[in-house]
Amino acid sequence: MDSERVLNLAIRVLVFILFMGWIFLWVMMPTNTYRQKWLHKIREKSYYSTYFGSEGTSLLMYTFPILFIAILGCVYVHLERKHEDRNVGTRKGKNHHGLAIWKQPAIVKGPLGIVSWTELALLAMFMALLVWSFATYLHNSFVKITPTSAAMDGEKVWESRSGSAGFWLGIVGNICLVFLFFPVARGSSLLPLLGLTSEGCIKYHIWLGHMTMAFFSAHGICFVIYWAATNNLSQMLKWAKTDVSNIAGELALVFGLIMWATTFPRIRRKFFEVFLYTHYLYILFIVFFIFHVGISYACIMFPGFYLFVIDRYLRFLQSRRRVRLLSARLLPCQALELNFSKHQGLKYNPTSTMFINIPSISKLQWHPFTITSHSDLEPETLSIVIKCEGTWSSKLYKTLSSSSSSTIDDHLQVSLEGPYGPASTSFLQFDTLLMISGGSGITPFISIIKHLIHNSKSHHQIPKLLLISAFKNTSDLTFLHLIQISDAATTLQDFQIEAYVTREKSPKNENPQIRSVIFKSHVGDSAAAAILGPNGWVWLAGVISSSFGIFLILIGVLNRYYIYPIDGNTNDVFDLGLRSFLHMLMVCFCIFTAATVAVIWNKRRVAKEGRQIQSVEGATPNASPCAMGFEREMELESSPFQALAQSVNVHYGERPNLSRILLGCKGESIGVLASGPKKLRQEVAAICSSGLSQNLHFHSISFTW
């Protein structure tokens, strides 16, 4: 075992210890032991600090451990990537059968979607934490509410208890809020550290969002009932100077309810743009939440939001760049492939996703698409495939197909964001890879096949490959052209494609043409590149650590020389809203400063490398990359459609018998990847989890974004 593997193992152990200690704090928080003994001793040392004030305890116990884990995660992923680059194509170790069972689907149908046993177990533990916390908080507070104590406050017992219940519902809702932003920080190191992808974590964000708003809604309702019963509805308009601000909490709840109302599936699918734009209310939701509870308590949910703000700002900076669009291929199945210039240092794994924005189509809309190119097989090109299934994609297809010339003089501005994808190529661990797709769901598999082609050319061992694709019409078979059939057939020995055309009984007597279009370059365009360069994970660790370090220095100076002389850590003099505002301002300043410096530094280095490459290319009498790309497009365009028949078995008028195909596969370890319509993925998941075959290992690729 080399030193890098030993270091990564040590990082995983340290991360596990830190995370379990952090979770242990949440388990103990509702207890009297924590609140009356431990917290009192901790506050004696940190609460009355003249530099960090009352928020010092929360920053130390709840924020620092997670940010430190995120930094360790950056180092871990960086070392893993270096190790994988040196050992590309090496067959991974086999999955232990006991562990493989936990990855199998436990729930196939239902509101939660396809859920593995691991996900179900973690969800059950999280729900248990919520129940334990609420029950313990409620029990400890109800014990103190007696007829005598209630009468002293001029209240009845049930009135006091309703107010107490409402308070603790809000506290438990904050637990959900703590985890809410982790899944949507697309470039966070925490996700690959856990073997997760940003797209696969969207469902966790959805679950947490529903739970958060359910608790906060109940929190608000209980307090309204309490104030109404005690004839104290004027409390709804209270904005206390040094205490909880009720009106800020109500505004946060209103913004949250607006977002929540648009998240339900029927509304989201029918009015997606409404859902998308209302979700930007999260900014106001968080701002007024912090005004409501104060910065000291808000530091408890700080780490997830802090990492999200870093990620969101880096994405914003990347989205400002204009990427050079080299060419497009228009497929007769109402789909198109866009080919972009790519910096050679930009690396990504198969099934990765890119977000694309074309201002001439829509200035605000960003749409995710699967990358179909391979970063090593096509080192200077990045390709995505777009199926026309909505207004945005249809308008783009119409714009490109309206030109009668193979060269478009008009400049098409394009911005990219990403890529986002898995940190490792885990599918290489299987003896056989069975990929099942429906319609445009084939696009993630194109990149996997190209990855296997690259490894095979490098004389590395690769799994056997079987691709089952279902299409509606004959024209949809042109998706298979993107796989580079002839190259795959000659390179991959154990490669088979079974295509099913479900709505046609026989092949049509037509030879649909694939049209290619090349775009002229623009001086303001650049090659697609990682926002923080080839060593992005190391730079991200630097951004997290430096921004948080600067933040600690600034709040130390603020507290010591401005707040403490006025308040003296009593929290009874200095305006709580102003204190929260200053802290939020400093967070934004520190993150923006550290991230901007890192991005500018890497942008200059990439530009310098680009000029060096151009000078070398200018000294050689080779054709330009643009011309070479166009020749390649014309070559692919002129290839006969009938060539598919030599490498693909096409079945007309029938659907694939998935049960027979899956259960008939022979091999010790078979990786089953399903991509496409929800029903197809559910059917494949049900077969793999049926227990009829022990060698099937299911993985779903969904277009959740």
Image: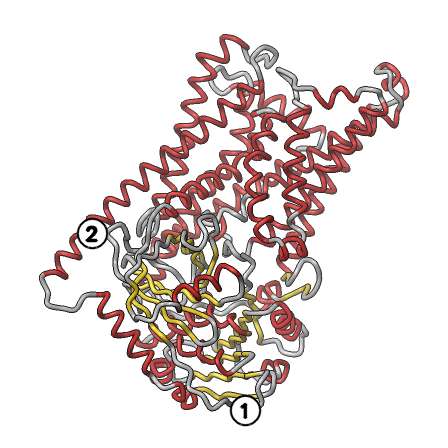
Residue shown at the point (47%, 58%) measured from the top left: 368
Looking at the picture, which amino acid does disc 2 mark?
Answer: Glu
**Secondary structure under the numbered disc 2 in the rendered image:** helix
**Secondary structure under the numbered disc 1 in the rendered image:** loop
According to the picture, the residue beneath numbered tag 1 turns out to be: 506
Relative image position of residue 77 (x, y in whole percent): 40, 52
Judging from the image, the colouring scheme is: secondary structure
- Measured Cα–Cα span from mark 1 to mark 2: 54 Å
Looking at the picture, which amino acid does disc 1 mark?
Answer: Ser
At label 2, counting other C-alpha atoms closer than 10 Å, the crowd grade (few under 14, some 14-19, many 20 or more) is: few
Relative image position of residue 120 (x, y in whole percent): 66, 57
According to the picture, the residue beneath numbered tag 2 turns out to be: 609
Tell whether 306 sits left or right of 595: right
At label 1, counting other C-alpha atoms closer than 10 Å, the crowd grade (few under 14, some 14-19, many 20 or more) is: few
Residue shown at the point (40%, 23%) measured from the top left: 553
Position of residue 579 relative to residue 311, above or below, is above
